[in-house]
Image (tube, helix red, strand yellow):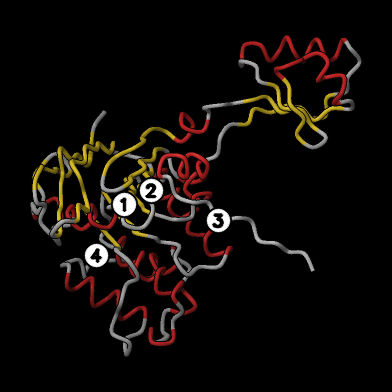
Amino acid sequence: MNAVIETRGLTKTYGDVRALDGLDLSIPRGGVYGVLGPNGAGKSTLFRILLGLIRPTAGSAAMMGGPLNDISHMRRTGSMIETPRFPPYLTARQVLRWLALEHGVGATADIPHWLARVGLTEAADRKVRGFSVGMMQRLGVAAALMSRPELVILDEPTSGMDPPGIQEMRALIRSLATEDGVTVVLASHQLLEVQRVCDRVAILNKGKLVREGTVSELTSVGERLRLAVSSADQVLAVLGAKGVRDGEAVLAEVKRAEGPALIRALVEANVDIHEARWVGTDLESIFFTETGAVQAPEADHGV
C-alpha cells in the first residue's frame, strides 16, 4: 500500500492530557479516507500536526513519503481545518483571488471553476460578511482546492449545511477522488455521509486507533440476508434458529455461499420473494461500539 500519510507512535500531550497517544496510522494514496472519533479523540490534533501548525511531543509522521513541513509537499496539499474565517469586506471571488496570490498561484488559479464546483457561482460577488456557516464552508473548500493539490485534508466540511448542501458536498468529494485523482482525508460527525463517501475509515478514541479498514469490510461484519416475502412464518419454519423476524421481512443468519440454496428452497416451498438483499452493521453502530460513546435516543415525535 502506497501511503500518503504515515504516523508511528505519534503522541501529543498538553500537561496531563494525551490528545494523541502513540498513534500508528497509514493512509493510502488515492480515494477518500475518513478519520472518525468523538470530541477529544485527537482528530484535529492529528490534522494540525500533519499541517505543521503544532509539533508532536513524541513519535514521527511523514507525508507524501517525506518529512512534515517540507515545502514541496505542503504546496501539493490543501486543507480546511474547522470553520474558515475570511475578511468580511471581501467578496467570495476576491477572497479566492487574494489567497491565490498568497499561495503563488494567482496566474493559474481558475477561480470561476472552483466557485462553480462548490456551488457559489451566484454568490461570487457577495461580501462574505453575509454568508451562512454552510456558505463559508463551501468557500473554505474552494480555497483548499484551487491550487489543485494532490492531497486535501478537510475537517467537518459539511458543518452548517442543509441536506441538499451535504449531498452536493458528498458528490464533490467523490468526484475529487475519482475524476481529479485527489486523495481526500476528512473528519466528520455525519456518520451516514462518511459511510456513503469514504473508501476506508479510521476510528480514534482517546488519541488511539481502535479500528481501521475499508467501509465494506467493517460493515460486512454480522452480515445477514434480508428477505421480504409473502409468508414470514414459512421462512422462519425453514430457517429455525437462523431466522429472526424484521417487521414483515425475515433476517436470515446464513453465509453468502448458502444464500442461493436458501432462495431455491423457499421458491420450491411456494414462498413469494419480493426482495432479497444482504445487510450488515452500519458504521454508526461500529462507531458507538468502538468508542463507548452514548448513542442519542431517537426523538419522540408523538403528540
- Provide the residue designation for mark 4: 108
* Residue 36: assigned label: 2
**Of 7 and 57, which appears nearest the observer?**
57
Q: Is residue 214 left or right of residue 245?
A: left
**Residue at point 41% right, 68% down?**
138
In the structure shown, which secondary structural element does the residue marked by tag 3 occupy? loop
Which quadrant of the rendered structure holds the C terminus?
A: bottom right
**Residue at point 47% right, 59% down?**
169
x and y percentages locating residue 51 in the rendered image: 18, 57
In the structure shown, which secondary structural element does the residue marked by tag 2 occupy? strand
Circle 2 residues within 10 Å: few <14, some 14–19, many ≥20: many
Q: Is residue 104 left or right of residue 274?
A: left
Q: Is residue 162 above or below residue 183?
A: below
Q: Amino acid at mark 3?
A: Ala
In the structure shown, which secondary structural element does the residue marked by tag 4 occupy? loop
In the structure shown, which secondary structural element does the residue marked by tag 1 occupy? loop
* Of callouts 3 and 2, the N-terminal one: 2
Q: Amino acid at mark 2?
A: Leu
Q: Is residue 100 above or below residue 287?
A: below
Q: CA distance from mark 4 to mark 2?
A: 35 Å
Which quadrant of the rendered structure holds the N terminus?
A: top left
Circle 4 residues within 10 Å: few <14, some 14–19, many ≥20: few
**Comparing labels 3 and 2, the label whose residue is closer to the camera:** 3
Q: Quick check: marks 4 and 2 in contact, CB under 8 Å?
A: no
Q: Quick check: marks 4 and 1 in contact, CB under 8 Å?
A: no
**Of 39 and 216, which appears nearest the observer?**
39
Q: Quick check: marks 1 and 2 in contact, CB under 8 Å?
A: yes
* Residue 296: assigned label: 3
Q: Amino acid at mark 1?
A: Ala
Q: CA distance from mark 1 to mark 2?
A: 8 Å
* Of callouts 1 and 2, the N-terminal one: 2
Q: Amino acid at mark 4?
A: Thr
